[in-house]
Amino acid sequence: MASRRNLKKDIDYLAGEVIANSYSCLYFNPERNRNEVIKIIEDAVELRNLLFSRIKPEEKNNRSLVKKHYAAIRNDLLTGIDGLFERLSETCK
């Protein structure tokens, strides 16, 4: 089972990548959809904070429920980040 520390690092890294790519888009295309890119950055920060608040499982004694809890967080992380990258690529074409 992965540790909470590594999960937090993954969340920070992926959210940071979305934000860094968003700022790169703003730097190279300052006249294009600035408000939409800023909204993507805000959504990335909101996703990061939401996932961090869900890290601690409610049921600590049942190992299978804890694994399912962390699997759900990882799934939400990957789908959320993928959606943000898709929005960013559509905005910065």
Image: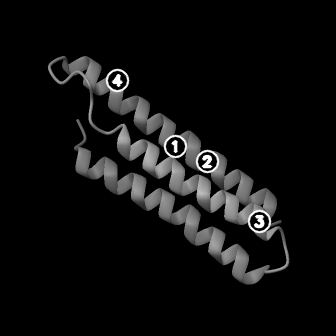
Q: Which quarter of the rendered picture does the C terminus lie within?
A: bottom right
On the image, which quarter does residue 39 sit in?
bottom right
On the image, which quarter does residue 64 sit in?
top left
Q: Amino acid at mark 3?
A: Asn
For the residues bearing labels 3 and 1, Cβ distance under 8 angstroms? no
The disc at residue 68 is 4
Q: CA–CA distance between discs 3 and 1?
A: 24 Å
> Residue at left 19%, top 17%?
62
Q: CA–CA distance between discs 1 and 4?
A: 15 Å
Q: CA–CA distance between discs 1 and 2?
A: 6 Å
Residue placed furthest toward the left: 61
What is the number of callouts on the image?
4
Could you tell which of marks 3 and 2 lies nearer the N-terminus? 3
> Residue at left 34%, top 23%?
68
Tag 1 residue: 78
Q: CA–CA distance between discs 3 and 2?
A: 20 Å
Question: Looking at the picture, how far across and down is residue 66, in whole percent?
Answer: 26, 25
Tag 2 residue: 82
| Mark 3 or 2, closer to the camera | 3
Q: Nearer the viewer, residue 18 or 42?
A: 42
Q: Is residue 83 above or below residue 40?
A: above
For the residues bearing labels 1 and 2, Cβ distance under 8 angstroms? yes
| Mark 3 or 4, closer to the camera | 3
On the image, which quarter does residue 69 sit in?
top left
